Image (spheres, rainbow, N blue to C red):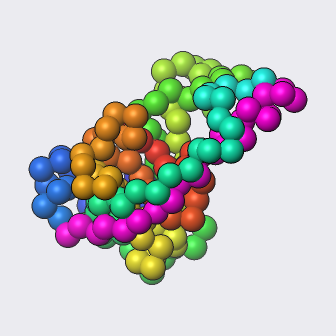
Amino acid sequence: GDPKLVKKPYNIGMDELVKMTPRELPVTLVCAGNRRKEQNMIRQTIGFNWGPSGVSTNVWKGVMLRDLLLKAGVSPTDMSDKHVEFIGVEDLPNKVGPGPFKDEPWGKLVKYGTSIPLSRAMNPAYDVLIAYQANGDVLQPDHGFPVRLIIPGYIGGRMIKW
């Protein structure tokens, strides 16, 4: 991250993460590809051919993103015009167009990612989690093992998996 914003960068392993104060809450995820079956009738898309059924509710357990950012020295007061960027482990699908990097269009540098406003990430009322369990069990690979981002109120496709 930007050294002006992230004053104390650090790496954290699973052993340390699970020792932090956990938060557990039910969140319903709606797949960004919900109704993709109907979309494919108009224009072919990529991904699973969902009908109207890409919805699930789990009780997620993890660490508040806010706690991790505070540990890294991110200011809880200077948040205007700032975002938290998340880069997942998955390759970005459907690589078309010029790509984001001048010297290596699409290459190995492009992964699935998203961002949210820093003000949302730092607000404890929004319950943004780095989750490591769902319904009391360790996450399965398809659901983000070892951790995944949970942003209540956002579409499921924004919840990056690592």
Q: Which residue is drawn at 42% across and 52% down?
A: 149
Magenta stretch: residue 39 in it?
yes
Residue 44, percent from left and from top: 78, 23
Using the image, determine if residue 124 lies above or below residue 114: below
| Magenta region, residue range | 21-43
Compare residues 114 and 158 and report the one nearer the observer. 158
Q: Residue at x 50, y 52 (%)?
A: 56
Using the image, determine if residue 30 lies above or below residue 107: below
Residue 126 horizontal side relative to residue 41, left or right: left
Residue 73 horizontal side relative to residue 103, left or right: left
Residue 143, percent from left and from top: 39, 40
Q: Residue at x 46, y 30 (%)?
A: 90
Magenta stretch: residue 37 in it?
yes
Compare residues 136 and 157 and report the one nearer the observer. 136
- Mark yes or no: residue 28 visible: yes
Instruction: Using the rendered view, name the quadrant where residue 35 is placed.
Output: top right
Instruction: Using the rendered view, name the quadrant where residue 98 is placed.
Output: top right
Residue 47, percent from left and from top: 62, 28
Q: Residue at x 17, y 57 (%)?
A: 18
